[in-house]
Image: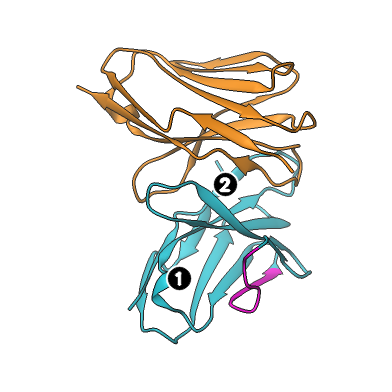
Chain colours: A cyan, B orange
């Protein structure tokens, strides 16, 4: 099956710093990648849709200047949490949709962000 | 937009029993319905999916049924095992690059 990786898996940072999370599709091309945030025992909350070569589409209530998304290639999307605060602590998961046309999403393993 | 409701939020069963999780959706244009299993701290994994041109699909102990008229679909797990314990999410989308909408999840606990 298709593989999506995420890096780092865990990150602890100080309040006010920025953190970059990478999402890679390892064996397929992904025109579209999604970024989700998940709180403990809660569902996946879509933050934004990342489209290769164009600006990301953010969901209502998600600050685009705080959560910067770049999808520079068909295999890489990055999410940068700028000026992180403790309330940004969460589990961030990306997913990728294969460009070949199937509907299936492939999820990354997630990144646990803790802001002190 | 699409709205997906999922019930129950928690389901506790004895090993060997069957478990059923139900979801409803609002947008009749939705035609792709995947189910994901997520273990604690791990990524959601697709376990089964169904498209609107079929009413039922089965894969060993797991089956999914779809009622397009009523706009609901269900996940059935038979002969449950402790390793089935996880959170299960349903989703609905119009396929292609359309963004899926997820249900709120069901925490399934299988007691040995």
Determine the secondary structure under disc 1. Answer: helix
Answer above or below: position of A24 versus B84: below
Disc 1 or 2, which lies upstream in sequence? 1
Q: Is residue B101 left or right of residue B107?
A: right
Q: Which residue is tagged 2? A: A106
In the picture, measured across the screen, residue A35 lies left or right of residue A83, that is right
Residue B109 spot, x, y in % from top left: 30, 29
Query: Which image quarter is the N terminus of chain A in?
Result: top right
Q: Which residue is mark 1?
A: A88
Query: Mark 2 falls within which chain?
Result: A
Tag count: 2
Instruction: Please give the name of the residue rendered at 55% of the width and 20% of the height, measured from the top-left corner.
Output: B74
**Is residue A3 something that shows in the picture?**
no
Q: Callout 1: 10 Å neighbours few (<14), some, many (20+)?
A: some
Q: Residue at x 33, y 18 (%)?
A: B80
Do dots 1 and 2 share one subunit?
yes
């Amino acid at each position: 099956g298709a593989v999506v990786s995420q890096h780092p898996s865990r990150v602890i940072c100080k309040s006010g710093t920025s953190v970059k999370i990478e999402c890679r599709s390892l064996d397929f091309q992904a025109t579209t990648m999604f970024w989700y945030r998940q709180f403990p025992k809660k569902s996946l909350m879509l933050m934004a849709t990342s489209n290769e070569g164009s600006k990301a589409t953010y969901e209502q209530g998600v600050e685009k200047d705080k959560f910067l998304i770049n999808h520079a290639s068909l295999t890489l999307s990055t999410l940068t949490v700028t000026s992180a605060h403790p309330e940004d602590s969460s589990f961030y998961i990306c997913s990728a949709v294969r460009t070949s046309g199937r509907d299936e999403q492939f999820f990354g393993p997630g990144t646990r962000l803790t802001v002190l | 937009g699409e709205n997906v409701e999922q019930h129950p939020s928690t389901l506790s069963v004895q090993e060997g029993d069957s478990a059923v999780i139900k979801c409803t959706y609002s947008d009749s244009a939705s035609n792709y319905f995947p189910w994901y299993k997520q273990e604690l701290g791990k990524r959601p994994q697709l376990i089964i999916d169904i498209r609107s041109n079929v009413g039922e699909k089965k894969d060993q102990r797991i089956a999914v049924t779809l009622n397009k008229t009523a706009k609901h679909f269900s996940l059935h797990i038979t002969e449950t095992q402790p390793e089935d314990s996880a959170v299960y999410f349903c989703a609905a989308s119009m396929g292609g690059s359309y963004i899926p909408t997820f249900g709120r999840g069901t925490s399934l606990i299988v007691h040995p």
